[in-house]
Image (cartoon, rainbow, N blue to C red):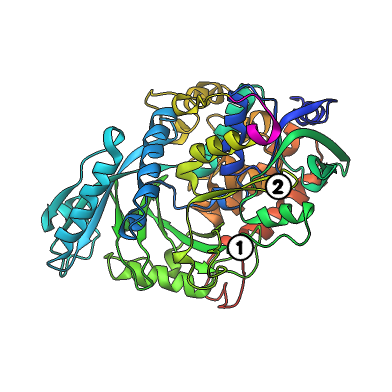
Amino acid sequence: MPQDPRSATLAAATAPGTWDLLVIGGGASGLGTAVEAATRGHRTLLLEGHDYAKGTSSRSTKLVHGGVRYLAQGNISLVREALHERGLLRKNAPHLTQSLRFVVPAYDWWAGAFYGLGLKLYDVLAGRLNLGRSKSLGKEAALERTPTLQAEGLMGGILYFDGQFDDARLAVTLLRTLEDHGGVALNYAPVTGLIQKNGQVVGARFRDAETGGEYEVRARVVVNATGVWADDIRRLENPDARPLLSPSQGSHVVVSKRFLPGDSAIMIPRTDDGRVLFAVPWHDHVVIGTTDLPVPETSFEPRPLEEEIAFILNTAARYLDPAPTRADVQSVYSGLRPLVKDEQSDGVGSTAALSRDHVIRISEGGLVTLTGGKWTTYRRMGEDTVDCAERVGGLPQRLTVTPGLHLHGWSEEPLPDALRVYGSDAQRIAALPGAGCFLHPGLPYTEAELRWGVRFESARTVEDLLARRTRALLLNARASLEVAPRAAAILAQELGQGPAWADEQVRRYREVAAGYLLGPASLSPGQGQGE
């Protein structure tokens, strides 16, 4: 039986001494910051209260993009920065990102020219890192690329290019990259308090969720990168801290590839609520979303509201033929955006108007809080935060190396789609027990991938394995429930646990997975506030 690697990681995290940076939060912003710090040579520790990318960072629309909607809003600087970062990520993680064609359908005579002009500007802003040039399409060409587009009334469209990725797999890749550069990261280690000395934040207390053990760690600077929970950490230092965030919920549905055959996505440029809606091919399925609703509370397991599901399916029905119905939905999921409040309006009003830029705040005690932003700009968020942290903590100020940093597993070799996300590690996975044993006929994953996730990617639960190390839960929630007992057995074997422990893992997973199923009356309009 392989030795559980967690004990060594916990020992490294709690060893005597002072870290240069302690990063709280294992999502896009926290992992990006930790990788930035470690690659500059700073001693870096990251603590995550649940699993890496457990929250928002595993629940995106799966796009690495500049943000066409932000262009329409006139936020040129945000779009330019995101397009630049999109290009860098495409170079630094070719095993995780790819160029994706999008068709913008035009059903009005003016739409082609109007959106075509905007997307030409999109090309210009991308500069030398552009993924491909946009162009106009006639009706036949648009239907050739996206044959299930509603043909009646279609006048043509615009073809443009953006990026696509697997969000949770990028998070795991950043974890491995951090470790490759000497950093230490520990999941299931919730921070329970901040250590202060002479009015300055000098460390944190955390609990090992698996054993209940309590620990203290010291650091020259502490970074709060906990996304929609950033205000909770800020209040550990100052209970009266004014909230920074107005969280917004975005939901998605996942359906069969038959509703969007081929390799092109669809972008609906203006929905009834003023957003854009995407239908995106992903892992041989189609992701359709997203919504934008303010939520009063945060949750680690948010649930799509009935109105969100109806909005997505009703909008899709106007553009797709055949159109998916509730019965066709294989999984539903929601994520929370950590939108930064408008200081003038105090965040009151539509979340579509709130800032998508990242912000950095430094408390009187020196706590550095990073929030806002999006996956596409994770690297730039980390760079800006470490620049700030170096000044706050009196650390040596060093230049970034991440614009050209190859992430763990970097590979340009063609690989089968199921193993492509592992890059150069794919051959090692293929050599593990169970490499030829698929978990389910409706899922592309093998038993070997689960063993790999436990041994090398810090997976600790069945949910970790089926929701984030593989994407079974998002692709087909019912199929993932069917394989949960086998996943639990493999996990228990790898960690030296018994049958009762495995049964409890299955029970917990079933509770979580139930929220990803969409039945005739599975969700009510008021159910499930959250991410």
Horizontal relation, residue 288 to residue 217: left or right: left
Q: Residue at x 64, y 31 (%)?
A: 390
In front of the other: 188 or 67: 67
Give the residues in magenta: 390-397
Residue at the extreme bottom of the image, as rendered: 525
Circles 1 and 2: CB atoms closer than 8 Å: no
Residue under numbered circle 1: 302
Residue 262: % across, % down:
27, 47
Name the amino acid type tagged 1: Pro
Q: Secondary structure at mark 2?
A: loop
Residue under numbered circle 2: 50
Q: Residue at x 76, y 25 (%)?
A: 1
In the image, which disc is placed on residue 87?
none
Q: Secondary structure at mark 1?
A: loop
In front of the other: 89 or 235: 235
Name the amino acid type tagged 2: His
Is residue 63 one of those drawn in magenta?
no
User: Is 430 drawn above or below residue 446 in the view shown?
Assistant: above
Q: Residue at x 77, y 56 (%)?
A: 238
Residue at the extreme right of the image, as rendered: 213
Residue 38: % across, % down:
62, 26
Where, by quadrant of the figure, is residue 198 drawn?
A: top right
Residue 267: % across, % down:
30, 57
Where, by quadrant of the figure, is residue 531 drawn?
A: bottom right
> Considering only order in the chain, which callout, 2 or 1, is on the residue closer to the N terminus?
2
